[in-house]
Image: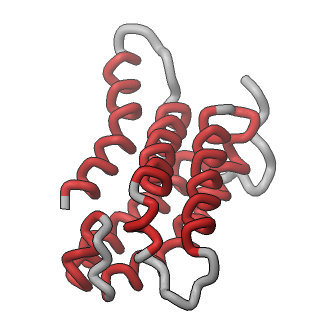
Amino acid sequence: MVTPLLMLLILTLPLLAGRLWRRAAPLWSDAEAAAWGLGLLFLFTASGHFLQADAMTRMLPPWVPQRLALVHATGVLEIAIALGLFLRRWRTLSAWAAALVLVAFFPANVYAAFQHAPMGGHAWGPAYLLVRAPLQLVLLGWTWWFLLRGRGLRRTAPA
């Protein structure tokens, strides 16, 4: 159950550091730091698609075709989202993509928990959803609050 805590740390550390350093010299806005936190988190989760690909295939039902290829493709998608979050020009579009991925991938987490998949906390079974569902809401809320609120579907202009 360490993974959700590590995910929260990765997500929030740039924002906390940015706020501390802002007292001495303004480096990042909260939105910039939040984008970096979410981008780093997406890189972290993408790494599992390659480093633990076999375990991740067990998070998908057996009827899903080409599960390993799908795991790798979604890892590439998460890397692309992360890179987009790091670049102001692509940040809003990438934040929308991140929100869609968070919603679209959640059923795989539910399935994996009920199957006790050997990946992250899913081995705990359905009880893991008591942690994972709120975490998913935090990630969606973070994305909305810091990166999407009031922005619509337009791209963020370069600063």
Residue 70 located left or right of residue 118: right
User: Viewer-proximal residue, 48 or 131?
Assistant: 48
Q: Can residue 149 be seen in this view?
A: no
On the image, the x and y values in percent for residue 107 come to: 48, 81
Q: Tell me the quarter of the image containing the C terminus.
A: top right
On the image, the x and y values in percent for residue 131 come to: 25, 70
Compared to residue 148, the image places residue 22 above or below, namely: above
Compared to residue 121, the image places residue 141 above or below, namely: above
Q: Which residue is drawn at 55% across and 68% down?
A: 68
User: Viewer-proximal residue, 121 or 70?
Assistant: 70
Q: Which residue lies furthest to the top in this view?
A: 24
Residue 24 falls in image quadrant: top left
Q: Residue at x 73, y 40 (%)?
A: 90
Residue 60 located left or right of residue 155: left
On the image, the x and y values in percent for residue 124 come to: 19, 77
Q: How many numbered callouts?
A: 0
Q: Residue at x 47, y 14 (%)?
A: 26
Q: Is residue 113 visible?
A: yes
Q: Residue furthest bottom?
A: 63
Residue 158 located left or right of residue 7: right
Compared to residue 30, the image places residue 20 above or below, namely: above
Q: Tell me the quarter of the image containing the N terminus.
A: bottom left
Residue 92 located left or right of residue 116: right
Scheme of image coloration: secondary structure
On the image, the x and y values in percent for residue 48 come to: 42, 54
